Each structure stands twice: as structure tokens, then as C-alpha cells.
Image: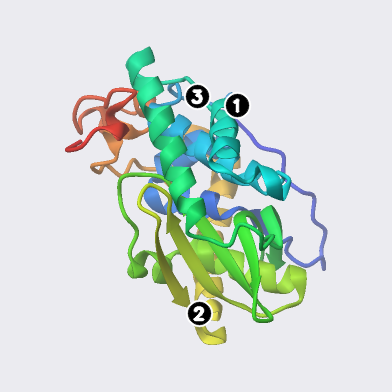
Amino acid sequence: MTTQPEQQTFAGMPTPLYTASPSRLLAWLDCPRRYRMQYLDRPRPAARAQRAHTSVGIATHNALRDFWDLPHADRTPAGVAALVRTSWIDVGFRDAEQSATWRLKVRDGVTNYLRGIDRHQQPLGIERSVSLRTDSIAVTGRIDRLDARDGELVVVDYKTGRHEPTETDARTSLPLALYAAGASRTMRRPCFRVELHHIPTGNVVAHEHTPESLQRKLAEAESIARDLRTADAEFREQGTESPRFPARPSAMCPWCDYRAHCEEGQRMGPEKSDWAGLETGT
């Protein structure tokens, strides 16, 4: 049985805060089996090799991150092209031709996106870590971009996939709400607006939270964390024999990094190719 170290407690001590990231909370909601393999199993089961769409996403985020370190005179299409070249990750593509084609697509997408924003208005933070604590949880996350606009903070999250986000995505996103609450507490400034920026199209969708809606999201995170505290404790006692980590088969199983270790997931259909995320109709 695999066991995990547990913080020692003594009579009269308060219950330690449950520490998590937004991605850890969402992993539990998506599939308890994948959560267990990703966060609890030791040694961790081997994950599959990185897919091409992940390489595209990381390279895009890195180019957008490094753009703000350029001198103003170098914030040009040529400067962006150089950033994409140095950021490029040639992993998961069908062949060299597909990789080269997508590098040009990313170059053009990032260039066009940056044309639509004020390139001289320096963000308040790039890949800024923020944290928040409640009576029961401590959450830390990293924001792609944090803007200061009209005395308030704005959370900007970049999206690079084929799915074009909607206002509903911005409104219901637990990570975005936690980022906003964390930014407000870390920076001691109001933060209610969250935005999803779709780099391939340049489209932006936004949602204006209220103190009440952010509090509801914090309550949601606390509820998930309560379940995780119980599940983690049971795993320490029973390991992989614990029944709290069933697979949750879905259309995402053919994409799962841990599919090779999950019979239920394998029954959901053949594994997607490394480059399937770049193709239409998949």
C-alpha cells in the first residue's frame, strides 16, 4: 500500500488548512481515478508523452510572457517571430512539416492578438502567483496576466485551443474566480473582472463578478476540498484499495495522460494521436 506523509496534530490544535491549486480541485471533479494517479500514487504512474496541442499552448504562453520583457522598440512583428522561434517546442507533431506549419500559425496568431491590445501599457503582473486562505483552505494559483485598469485589477487568462470560450465559460470558471479573489487579497485592490483571451481568434469574453459571486466560488472550492481531505486521508490508510477513487469514464478518456493505467478509460475508445488536438473534427 502507498502511504503519504501526514502533518502531525495534537489535541486542541486547529485542523490544518487544506492546501491545493485550482487544477488539483478540478482534477478531482473530472475523474477521481486520474486525481489519485496524478496527485497521490507514489511512485506516480507514467504519464503519456506530451501532445502537440500542449506544445502549441506552452509555446504560445511563453511567447506572450516574454513579450513584455522586450524593449518597446522591439515589440514588433519581427520581435514576436523571434520569441515564437525560441519558445517553440517540437514535441508531439506528426512530422517536421506539421511542426513548421503550426509554428507559423502561432507566430501569426500571437502577432495579430498583440496588434489588438495596448503594447505599451505594461501589465501589473505576468504569470503572477497569488494565494488566498479561508478558514479551511489555502489556494495558490498563477495568473497568465494581471492588468490594472481604472483602479481595479483584471485577471486575463490565455486560451489557445480550438474551442472558442464563451461568456458562460468565464462566468462559471472556478480557477478564474479563485485568481480574482487571490489577486485582490494579495495586491489589496479590488478585482472582479475576469477575461478569457482566445489567441487564435483574438476574441475576448469577460465576466464581472460581485463580492457575492466570488464568495459562492470560494464556498465551492471549500466543498471540494472537504471531499479531498476525506479522500486523501482514506488513501493514506487504504492506498489504491480505497473505493473513493472510481474512474469517471467520459469522452475525455481517449485524451487522458493516464489512460494506459485505466481499464475503464481504455474501453471508451482508441487513444487519440499525439496531434489529434490540432485537427478539426476530433
- Which is more foreground, mark 3 or mark 2? 2
For disc 2, the marked residue is: 209
For the point 67% across and 80% down, the residue is 190
Q: Is residue 175 above or below residue 153?
A: above
Nearer-the-camera pick, 23 or 238: 23
Task: Name the disc covering residue 45, or none.
Answer: 3
For the point 45% across and 58% down, the residue is 197
- Labels 1 & 3 near each other (Cβ < 8 A): no
For the point 70% across and 58% down, the residue is 125
* Amino acid identity at mark 1: Thr
The residues bearing labels 1 and 3 have C-alpha atoms spaced at a distance of 31 Å
Nearer-the-camera pick, 43 or 257: 257
The residues bearing labels 1 and 2 have C-alpha atoms spaced at a distance of 37 Å
Q: Residues within 10 Å of mark 2 (few under 14, many from 20)?
A: some
* Amino acid identity at mark 3: Pro
Residue 118 can be seen in this image:
yes
Q: Is residue 28 above or below residue 188?
A: above
- Which is more foreground, mark 1 or mark 3? 1
Q: Which quarter of the rendering shows the N terminus?
A: top right
x then y, percent, for residue 157: 52, 57
- Pick whichever of labels 3 and 2 is earlier in the sequence: 3
In the picture provided, is 53 more to the left or to the right than 176?
left
